Image: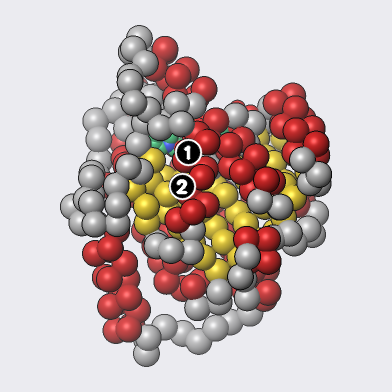
Amino acid sequence: MDFTRKYGPWALITGASEGTGSAFARAVARRGLDCVLIARREAPLAALAAEIRALGRQCVTASVDLARPDAAARVAEAAGGREIGLYIANAGADTVNSRFLDRDIAEWDGLVTLNVLTTMRNCHWLGRAMRARRRGGMILVGSGACYGGLHGLAVYTAAKGFALNFGEALWSELGEAGIDVLSLILGRTDTPAHRRSLELAGQPVPDGMARPEEVARVGLERLGRIAVHNWGEDEHGTGMSPISPAQRQARLLAVKAMSAGYVAKEKA
Ligand SMILES: NC(=O)c1ccc[n+]([C@@H]2O[C@H](COP(=O)([O-])OP(=O)(O)OC[C@H]3O[C@@H](n4cnc5c(N)ncnc54)[C@H](OP(=O)(O)O)[C@@H]3O)[C@@H](O)[C@H]2O)c1
């Protein structure tokens, strides 16, 4: 099935005002999808929407703070009944950058809402519509931080760990309905948000960061081929993980075969 028939007609992309999110938006528009773009800042979203319309695609934008409890409902409202065939959950970096006890709990609540609750809720309402059509795709943009707790990143590593387990399980469950799910695990990537974090921390800009355009290209290329892609590795490389994506996928298939009899039958 070609890209637009499998993942069209609309893509919904979070964190689309810059970096990897805007690179994904340009990449899917060039492949023939219309775009719903979500972030907080309206001006960069409007500029990107003009670019996408110049490519001959439709585009709508909405300013939504994904770290707020009502975010998923506001995203659904922005989508407005359009047929979303591809969801790219991209926004999710740790902009708090601090030890756990050194910040108020409200900041950590926001990071968990952004990475865990809003993404989970969007996957639910979008996933049900995709299941009814028996096609679609989801890319959950993750981080190598998902593979274990790290000093100074307690909530971020935990939230990205949730996203990895969640994405893998959805790969297995939603695959039955023709929906592809990819956990795209990034390393250091040259985004404006990451540059701002480096500057705040007084750190130099490192060499060899991934480029957002490459991240989007590889993410779209890997979708539908594997459950997890670790940036810069092939499916047999382990990187920051104790096991490779190929081993993770074999484990998912083995567990699925074992648990088939225990899972409750489909409910609407
Ligand atoms: N950059 C890296 O080195 C790196 C490494 C590993 C993993 N990742 C992952 O890659 C993804 C993208 O990272 P990134 O570096 O580009 O930073 P990011 O902050 O996750 O993404 C920036 C985009 O997200 C939007 N955004 C951020 N917080 C938001 C909120 N609360 N509500 C709505 N939109 C929000 C920003 O727009 P507005 O400011 O306009 O809202 C912007 O469009 C994240 O999931 C991150 O965890 C990045």
The answer to whether the residue labelled 1 contacts the one labelled 2, judged by CB atoms less than 8 Å apart, is yes
Q: Which quadrant of the figure contains the C terminus?
A: bottom right
Going by the image, does 81 lie left or right of 67? right
Let me know if residue 238 appears in the view.
yes
Q: Which residue lies most toward the bottom here?
A: 261
- Near mark 2 (Cα within 10 A), the count class, few <14, some 14-19 or many ≥20, is some
Q: CA distance from mark 1 to mark 2?
A: 6 Å
Going by the image, does 101 lie left or right of 13? left
Camera-side residue of 34 and 66: 34
Q: Residue at x 45, y 26 (%)?
A: 190
Q: Which residue lies most toward the top here?
A: 202
Q: Which residue is mark 2?
A: 218
Camera-side residue of 111 and 147: 147
Q: Secondary structure at mark 2?
A: helix
Q: Up-down: is 203 above or below 45?
A: above
Q: Residue at x 79, y 59 (%)?
A: 81
Residue 49 screen position, x and y as percent: 76, 35
Camera-side residue of 95 and 212: 212
Residue 85 screen position, x and y as percent: 66, 61
Q: Which residue is mark 1?
A: 214
